[in-house]
Image (spheres, helix red, strand yellow):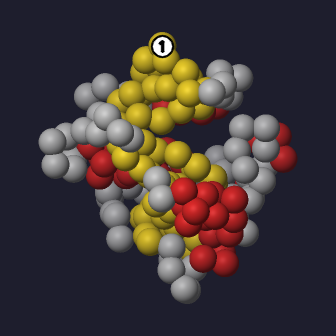
């Protein structure tokens, strides 16, 4: 379990845990709001499959207290940078600070790995909510693109 000590806005501890036999179905069923589907997968199941099949990403279940409320994954690029990807917070849980706590927890954990690697993520330029969240947490656009997404790096 990865516990950064962050709480959501209703006071629940947000932790990241391995996807396992007990929680994978709940993670697979995580679904964003309809208006977010142009930026993220329609269900957590897509990201779980990507993690299983690509060999690049590792999926984590996002918990608030003892309830699965989302999905996030992380990976390591060829240049040694560590990436956050595939974050989905269930539509019913949004607006409570779960996404913020998730990114804070995972970014801190990744950045503390041996050698303090750069922590990066990407988002579509039209996703203003993501840009605002990531910017408020210290991620700054690098000027590079990955397909149609802006790459941002955490500046400490």
**Tag count:** 1
Rendered image quadrant of residue 40: top right
x, y percent for residue 155? 31, 25
x 34%, y 64%: residue: 2
Instruction: Give the position of the N terminus as an image quadrant.
Output: bottom left
- SS at badge 1: strand
Farthest residue toward the right? 34
Farthest residue toward the top? 143
x 19%, y 40%: residue: 116
Mark 1 neighbour density, 10 Å: few (under 14) some (14–19) many (20 or more):
few
x, y percent for residue 36? 76, 41
Rendered image quadrant of residue 146: top right
x, y percent for residue 151? 50, 26
Residue 69 in the figure: left or right of residue 83: right
Work out whether residue 19 or residue 137 is closer to the camera in this orientation and state it: 19
Residue 25 in the figure: left or right of residue 155: right
Q: In this picture, is 119 found above or below 150? A: below
x 49%, y 32%: residue: 134
Q: Say if residue 104 shows up in the picture.
A: no
Work out whether residue 101 or residue 72 is closer to the camera in this orientation and state it: 72
Work out whether residue 5 or residue 150 is closer to the camera in this orientation and state it: 150
Instruction: Give the position of the C terminus as an image quadrant.
Output: top left
x 16%, y 49%: residue: 114
Q: What residue is shown with label 1?
A: 143
């Amino acid at each position: 379990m990865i516990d950064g000590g962050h709480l959501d806005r209703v006071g629940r501890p947000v932790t990241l845990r391995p996807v396992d036999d007990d929680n994978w179905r709940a993670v697979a069923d995580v679904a964003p709001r309809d208006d977010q589907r142009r930026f993220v997968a329609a269900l957590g199941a897509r990201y779980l499959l990507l993690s299983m099949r690509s060999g690049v990403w590792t999926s984590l279940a996002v918990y608030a207290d003892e309830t699965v409320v989302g999905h996030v994954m992380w990976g390591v690029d060829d240049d040694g940078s560590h990436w956050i990807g595939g974050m989905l917070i269930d539509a019913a849980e949004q607006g409570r600070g779960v996404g913020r706590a998730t990114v804070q927890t995972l970014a801190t954990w990744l950045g503390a790995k041996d050698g303090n690697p750069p922590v990066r993520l990407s988002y579509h330029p039209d996703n203003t909510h993501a840009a605002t969240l990531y910017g408020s947490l210290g991620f700054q656009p690098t000027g590079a693109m990955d397909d149609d997404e802006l790459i941002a790096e955490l500046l400490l």
